[in-house]
Image (cartoon, rainbow, N blue to C red):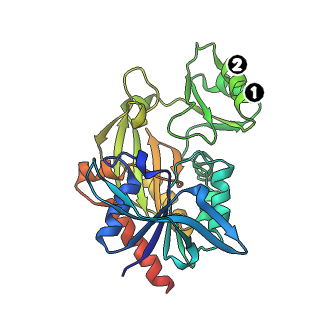
Amino acid sequence: MSLAVAIQMDPIESIDIEGDSTFSLALEALERGHILYHYLPKSLSLRDGSLLAKARPLTVRRDKENYFTLENEQVLELSKTDVVLMRQDPPFDMTYITTTHLLEHIHPKTLVVNNPIAVRNAPEKLYATHFKGLMPPTLITSDHDEVISFRTEQSDIIIKPLYGNGGAGVFHISPKDENLNALLEMFSGISKEPIIAQRYLPEVRNGDKRIILVEGEPVGAINRVPALGEARSNMHVGGRAEKTKLTDREKHICKQIGPDLKNQGLIFVGIDVIGDYLTEINVTSPTGIQEIDRFDNIKISGLIWDAIEARVKSSN
């Protein structure tokens, strides 16, 4: 099976090939004989019902000094491709949402991974709230009084932007911290969007686990340990990846959310678990597969392509 695959992503010139999940997926696709095209989200156009992208044929190789080749730009009618990988990084803003509306014009005849309708309906921090009993105490609001009341009730909390990513704007407000009001004023000045507050989980000092699910089934995990003096475990802010195994509680979480992920066409998902609690379900552009591969000697990109190819085959 040779598929025409268009990858909607950020500029490929800026990626780290040792950690980028999209690079791993592209490399695996080429090894399977698929044909790749690269385009930027801003290159999408809907014209008289046809979804077009200014795209360039792409090849990649695991060579840090020369890891990609982009050929001459062409106008690609995306309905004539077999698969579109929606892989640009968040934030989950109106630009991101607009791309899901545009890609909806071709899905599912052209398989979009992940399903753009489900992606639009499942922003990371909101989607997780639909699974009762899995999250820590959580508040989503624009009401400052509610946040203050929540802090009084929980004592030790985290606040963060509802649609943020990569650990940006995450603050730990300890019981004696006097900065909450100032931070709420800052958030209000930056955005009119609600914020999310959660009970602080001290277990984060032992790590924030990223678990990858393919078609709703867990296939691997890494533990991300925050740097000394840091409340965030994201690796680009100094977090350290460690080998790990799933606990019974984590298997239970995966079992609870897995069927819904599969039914909605969320083929490749990364969830975050701290202690016994689910904190996020990442469906927009999950990462972590290369780190897991190195620790566990598996090939998650292969499992993802197995799932994609099976879906394409079943639809023909």
Q: Is residue 131 left or right of residue 19?
A: right
What's the residue at 37%, 61% (across, down)?
A: 25
Residue 2 sits in which quadrant? bottom left
* Residue marked by disc 1: 144
SS class, disc 2: helix
Q: Amino acid at mark 1?
A: His
Residues at badges 2 and 1 in contact (C-beta under 8 Å)? yes
SS class, disc 1: helix
**Of the residues under marks 2 and 1, which one precedes in the sequence?**
1
Residue 267 seen: no
Q: Amino acid at mark 2?
A: Asn
What's the residue at 72%, 39% (across, down)?
A: 193
Q: Is residue 18 above or below residue 307?
A: above
Residue 227 sits in which quadrant? top left
Q: Is residue 42 above or below residue 136?
A: below
Give whichever of 51, 301 is nearer the camera. Answer: 51
Q: Residue furthest front?
A: 72
Residue 116 seen: yes
Q: Is residue 188 left or right of residue 170?
A: right
Give the alpha-carbon distance from disc 2 to disc 1, as whole Å. Answer: 8 Å
